[in-house]
Image (tube, rainbow, N blue to C red):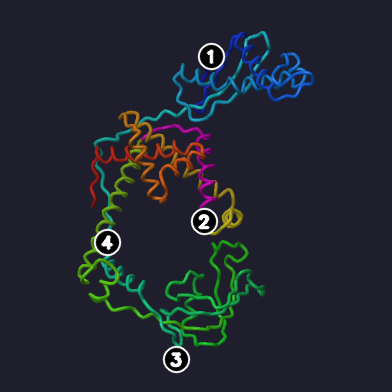
Amino acid sequence: MKTTIEKQPENIVKVDIEIPAKDAVNYYNNAAKRLAQYVNIPGFRKGKAPRNIVEQNIGEDRIKHEALENALPRIFSEVIKDNNFDVVAQPYVESYDYKIGEDLKIVAKIELRPEVILGQYKGLNIDIEGHKIPEDALQKSIDGLLEQHASSIIITDRKTIDTDTIVFDFEGFSNGEKIEHGDAKNFTLDLAHSSFIPGFAEQLVDRPLGEEFEINVTFPENYHEKKLAGQPAVFKCKINEIKSKVLPELTDEFVQKIGPFKTVEELRSDIQKYLDNQKADIDRINTEKALFEKVSSDAKVEIQQSMIDREADQLLEEYKQKLSMQGFTWEQALEAQGYDEIMKSLKEDAAVRVKNSLVIDKIAKEEKIEVSQAEFGAKLSELSKMYQIDTNTMIKQLSQTPGVFNAISHQALNEKVTQFLADNNTVNIK
C-alpha cells in the first residue's frame, strides 16, 4: 500500500491511497463470496454460484461497495498507525477508483486533534474569594427543620395571612379568552412558597373563606407560552379552606424524635458542622474551577469548527433531555427562545468544553497521567452506588450505548488532572 499525505486547513489531512491490484481483487472476490450467501440464484445453492453469475445478479458496484466496507477499517487503521495520526473523528472517503485488474485508488480525509500549546500550568499562585456562610444560616436551617415537622390546623374565623396554605378554585382569562390549563378546583397553594407568576399569591392574602373575587396579574415577558408573555390576565378565585402551620417547639424532646441527638445544642453543633463542610466543598470546587480556567485561558489551540459542531449536537441532545425532565417540550423552547439563539448559546458552551477537554488531554500526556484499570473499576463502582444499581447490571446497560465507557474513562482522567493541578499550584482563599 502506498500513501501520499497532504495537510489541509482545519486540521484535515488528505490521504491518497494506492492498493495493489492483487489485494484489490482479493477484496472483490471475498465480497462476492459473502454476498452470494444471501442471494437466491436459480440453479445454485447459496454461496456456490461463480463470481460472474453473482455479478450478473447483483452488479459489480454492489460487490465493490461491500469490498470497500469490509476493507476500509483495516486500511485506515494501517494509515493512522504508520503516520502516527491522532484522529478525532471517523476518516471518510472522498472518492475512489476501483477497476478490477488495476490498483485501487482511494482519496480519503482524516480529521486530526488540534495541537495544544500549554502556558504555565505548574507553580501558579492565584487568589480567589472564599465562600461566606450567611450569619443567619444556622437559624434558617433550624427554622426549615421546624417547618418540615409542622402540623396544620383549619382556620375558620379570620382572613388569610401570608404564611397560610389555602385550598381554592381559580379560572384565568387573558384578553377576554380563557387561558388553556389556567383553571383548577380545590388547588392547594402554600402562600409563603408559591411558584405561581409574580403577584398572584400576594393577592390571595387578606381574603375571607367562601367569597368570590378577582385578581389581576401580568405574565412575565419571558413566560414559556409566547402567547401569554407580557400579557395582562384576570383570575376568578374562591377560597374553600384555610390552613395555618403550627411549628413544634425547639426542645430536647423534639430533637430526640427527629435524629440521633440528645440536646438542642447537639443539633446546633451538627448543623454548624454541615455548614462548615459545605463551605469547604464550595471553596474546593471554586479553587479547582479558578485554577483550571487560568490554565485553559493561557493555553493556545486552533479548534476546527467541525469539533465544535459535533459537541454542540451532543449538548443539544442533553438540552432536550433536560427540557423533558422539567416538563417542557422542544417546541416550547423553540417558541420561547428561537432556534438561532439556542444554538448560539450551545455552540459557545461547546467551544469551551472542547478546549477544556483538549487541555486536559494535553496535560495528561505531558505528565504521563493515565487511568488504570483499577481506577476505572472504582469509577464504575462509584456510579453504581450513585444510581443504586448492581455494578454488573449497570455495565450491561451502559455497554448498549456507544462511547459511554470512553466518556467515563475521560471523566476519571479529568479528575486526576484536576487533582494534579491542585497539588502543583497554590490558590489563596481570601
The residue under label 1 is 4
In front of the other: label 3 or label 4?
3
Closer to the N terminus: mark 2 or mark 4?
A: 4
User: Residue 62's x, y, as percent?
Assistant: 70, 22
Q: Is residue 411 left or right of residue 39?
A: left
Magenta includes 176?
Answer: no
Please identify the dominant SS of the magenta region.
Answer: helix
The residue under label 3 is 157
Using the image as rendered, state which of residue 24 and residue 387 is in the foreground: 387
Magenta includes 309?
Answer: yes
- The amino acid sitting under disc 2 is Met
Q: Are marks 4 and 1 in contact (CB under 8 Å)?
A: no
Residue 297, image quadrant: top left
The residue positioned 49% from the left and 71% from the top of the image is: 198
The residue under label 4 is 133
Q: At numbered mark 3, what does the secondary structure look like: helix, strand or loop?
A: loop
User: Residue 161's x, y, as percent?
Assistant: 43, 83
